[in-house]
Image (cartoon, rainbow, N blue to C red):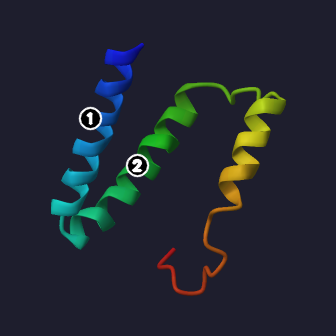
């Protein structure tokens, strides 16, 4: 488990460093691309059934979303 944990930490660190090097325009383009991918995957696969644990995780994550949507472009 030790090497796997070190690999995951290293991979996340590299991912963060890559994000720091990207321009704002590249980050702005990434969101619509990811939304499109989710839409395509949603058409290809049936809706997953969520159990209690899934709902708890989603509820916890949603609490961290910003509540001020007045300044968004969508």
Q: Indicate which disc residue 34 carries.
A: 2
Percent across and percent down for residue 32 are 39, 58
Please state if 74 lies on the left or on the right of 30 as rendered. right
Q: Between tags 2 and 1, which lies in front?
A: 1
The residue carrying pointer 2 sits among few (fewer than 14), some (14 to 19) or many (20 or more) residues within 10 Å by Cα, namely few
Numbered badge on residue 10: 1
* SS category of the residue bearing label 2: helix
The picture places residue 15, in percent across and down from the top left corner, at 26, 45
Report the front residue among 6 and 65. Answer: 6
**Up-down relation of residue 2 to residue 13 (above or below):** above
User: Along the line of sight, which residue is nearer the eye, 22 or 5?
Assistant: 5
Name the residue at 38% across, 24% down: 5
Q: Residue furthest right?
A: 52
Residue 10 lies, with reference to residue 67, above or below; the image says: above
62 sits left or right of 6 in the view? right
Q: Position of residue 1 (x, y in %)?
A: 42, 13
Bin the neighbour count of mark 1 within 10 Å (Cα to Cα): few under 14, some 14-19, many 20 and up: few
Residue shown at the point (51%, 74%) measured from the top left: 74
């Amino acid at each position: 488990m030790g090497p796997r944990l070190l690999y995951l930490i290293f991979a996340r660190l590299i991912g963060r460093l890559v994000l720091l090097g990207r321009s704002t325009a590249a980050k702005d383009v990434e969101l619509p691309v990811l939304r499109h991918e989710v839409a395509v995957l949603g058409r290809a696969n049936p809706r997953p059934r969520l159990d209690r644990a899934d709902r708890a995780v989603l509820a916890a994550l949603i609490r961290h979303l910003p509540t001020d949507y007045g300044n968004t472009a969508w």
